[in-house]
Image: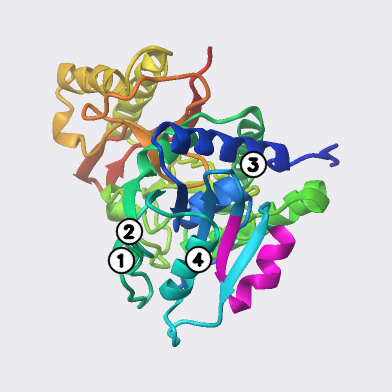
Amino acid sequence: MSWQVTHLQISEAEHRARCVALQGHLTAQRLRGVVLFDADYIKYFTGFAFIPTERPMAFLMNAAGERALFVPRLEVEHAESLALIDRVFHYLEYPHDPHPMQILAEHLAEFGITGRVGADSDGYPWILGYRGPELSTLTGLTVEHVRAFVEDQMMIKSPAELALLAESVRWANLAHTLLQRYTAVGLTETEVSERASQAATRAMLDAIGPVYRAQSNTYSGAIAGYRGQIGRNSTIPHALANNLTFQPGDVLVTGASAPVWGYVCELERTMVMGQPSAEVERFFGHMLALQEIAFEALQPGAVCADVDRAVRAYYEQHDLMPYWKHHVGHAIGLRYHEGPFLDIGDTTELRPGMVFTVEPGLYVPGVGASAIRIPCSSLRTVAC
């Protein structure tokens, strides 16, 4: 098998265009610059993928559009070689004297980021044991939150982003096909998941290895598994893997993905060990109908709430609300869960370029030897 893939990443020009759009927002809001601490935001604007830790890191851009990264000493060469920015500022270590935030304050002043500035949070978030002062307290800056603008910008996927998501789906689908092929009574979810994930990853690397980058903090290739959603645990939407052994009659809920330059899909299916019962088939039919209703409602100009309302109307019409647990789906891209959400509480207008998971589910406890969770997650792009 050979794929003629020569370009499989976001270009420097696209990263620059993203920064230009952000700069336009700063100008419109009369902000003197921006500071972003979120690792996914940093990746979105600079292409720099890293493991966030207690050591503060940030993306800086001043009103003139000059871009910089603020990193600990151990990340300097990493940032200089991979990030699409103009400068790299660094500090020695955390915790240290002086505190990294004090060093950041000096660099912000040097970079012309003063007065009113945009930020995704007022200081580095307290993760993995980090503690530090608020940005506004330390610097005297007036911090205006720009997270909503950044999230809105990330909602609309470019053709390059759509291509990366499609590539993710391709290899997730292979991993899931192998998962289904390898699953058998008496085996454990751990051995089957590992076998399918490794085989799919090897095939992916044989096909597109020279241009493939995972850029994921979690996975280095295609993955497929069950997350413990086996038998009676199948009604737990977000269970964890428990090395369970497959038994005859088990309802199985799967999950598959493949990070491709940081972009991920979410593919879920429902399977049964052996012949499904008439009741399982009946609920599965309802689930397919629910998903088709959602697909039909995903139209430009509608709002997210419309999709959820249309789906819930089917639940109510067929007395299925006792088996309802969550909204229809969510956007996806650099993160497994992004906004907006297909929920009655989200009035975001559906626009071309948005990508959603569509995963209505039915959760029926105590059916025979197992319970039933019947979701079916697929990606759907809002097209023109």
Q: x, y (%) of residue 1?
A: 84, 42
Q: Residue at x 64, y 56 (%)?
A: 221
C-alpha gap between disc 1 and disc 3: 29 Å
Please report whichever mark, 1 or 3, sits nearer to the chain's N-terminal start: 3
At label 3, which amino acid type do we have? His
Specify few, some or many for label 2: CA neighbours under 10 Å numbering under 14, 14-19, or 20 or more: many
Per the image, label 3 sits on a secondary structure element best described as helix
Q: Which residue is mark 1?
A: 134
C-alpha gap between disc 2 and disc 1: 5 Å
Residue 239 or 341: which is nearer the viewer?
A: 341
Q: Which residue is mark 2?
A: 122
Q: x, y (%) of residue 4?
A: 85, 37
At label 1, which amino acid type do we have? Glu
Q: Nearer the viewer, mark 1 or mark 4?
A: 1
Q: Would you identify the image quadrant in which residue 50 lies?
A: bottom right
Q: Residue at x 66, y 60 (%)?
A: 87
Q: Is residue 16 magenta?
A: no
Q: Give the magenta-colored segment's residue range.
A: 68-82
Q: Are marks 2 and 1 in contact (CB under 8 Å)?
A: yes
C-alpha gap between disc 1 and disc 4: 14 Å
Per the image, label 4 sits on a secondary structure element best described as loop
At label 2, which amino acid type do we have? Asp
Which mark, residue 57? 4
Please report whichever mark, 4 or 2, sits nearer to the chain's N-terminal start: 4
Which mark, residue 15? 3
